[in-house]
Amino acid sequence: MIDLHLHMDGSLTPELVGELAAERSIRLPVPEGRTLAQSLRVPDSCRSLNDYLACFHLPLLVLQDPPAVEKAFDSLCRRLKRQGLAYAEIRFAPQLHLKNGCTQEEITEAAIRGIARSGFFAGLILCCMRGKGNEAENLETLETASRRLGRGVAAADLAGAEALYPTRAFSGLFARAAVLGLPLTTHAGEAGGPDSVASAVSFGAVRIGHGLRSVEDPQVMSLLAEQQICLELCPTSNLQTGACPSLAEYPVRHFLELGIPCTINTDNMTVSGTDIFREHSLLQHAFSFTAEEMGGFLQTAIRHAFLDPEQKQFLRRSIGI
Ligand SMILES: [Zn+2]
């Protein structure tokens, strides 16, 4: 298995979050009558991306120093290794981890150390954040990614509240990423419409996180097929945020029929309460995919991973495809 769309802060076990809090004497504001585990996972009432993003508050409280970030990546990677994954691209936003005065560089180095310590084969994607007033932080994220590109960092991303901060507002940021030669994926077509996907592609994104709402515009669908832009689908998360109303309406077959490359991913193992096996079986059963078609998702993941050709060859050999 391969996961190309996995957020570190949304995939930590409640045990680890509790342990990091205890080590730092942080009292986590868990609401009355709820456990930590319940507070880290989306409630059944979750209907929007904004509701979904609220679950990241607690883990971020304990991830504000390099040892915590290193331990979090190490622990997550060991878990992925135990689950049997061959490779993952793990993302996070270093600018959300600076409350104790660290730099994005220090936080990113801690993440790279954590991955290396685990012995798991993983790449790091640094997320810029949608928002207002954080332009300098976003540019610093790109500079940090550029300094570490190929040495721990695989690519950059844009994440956060898409409905509130449309993709087109970030043209300057994407232009800087292009100047730095950073491979780019972008969360788009999740809370925003197909225009958000078209903007991301026109700005240089070669992969799209989710991209579901592309289905609303045939021209955007053609664009994705023509340019072979890879969609990082995360079915459970997409149902929870309301990006797709039901599994029956999940447009994966539609994408595949048009030749749009699709991969299956978790987004957030803890927040969504899932893992990569569950995501694969969810789609396999809902759409009666054959074993060959399921293998196709893995082939696509390798083809569009932010890896060089030798690393992709290694990955193909290690999976046996
Ligand atoms: Zn995501």
Image (tube, helix red, strand yellow):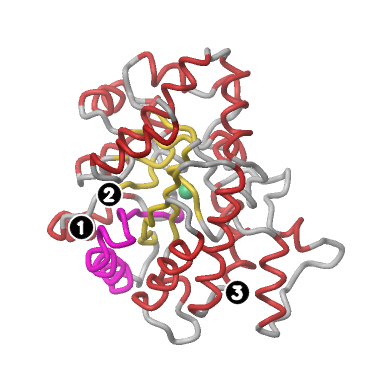
Cβ–Cβ below 8 Å for labels 1 and 2?
Answer: yes
For disc 1, the marked residue is 177
Q: Nearer the viewer, residue 210 or 217?
A: 210
Return the disc, 1 or 2, that comes first in the chain's sequence: 1
Q: Is mark 1 within 8 Å of ligand 1?
A: no
Instruction: Please tell me whether mark 1 sits on a helix, a strand or a loop.
Output: helix
Which amino acid type corresponds to the residue marked 2 in the rendered image?
Leu
Quadrant occupied by the C terminus? top left
Marks 1 and 3 sit apart, C-alpha to C-alpha, by: 29 Å
Structural crowding at the residue carrying mark 1, measured as other residues with C-alpha within 10 Å and reported as few (<14), some (14–19) or many (≥20): many
**Which residue is at 27% across, 44% downward?**
200
Q: Which mark is residue 61?
A: 3
* 284 with respect to 316 (left or right): right
Marks 2 and 3 sit apart, C-alpha to C-alpha, by: 28 Å
Specify the segment rendered in magenta.
135-161
Above/below status of 34 relative to 301: below
**Which residue is at 60% across, 25% downward?**
247
Which amino acid type corresponds to the residue marked 3 in the rendered image?
Leu
Q: Which mark is residue 184?
A: 2
Return the disc, 1 or 3, that comes first in the chain's sequence: 3
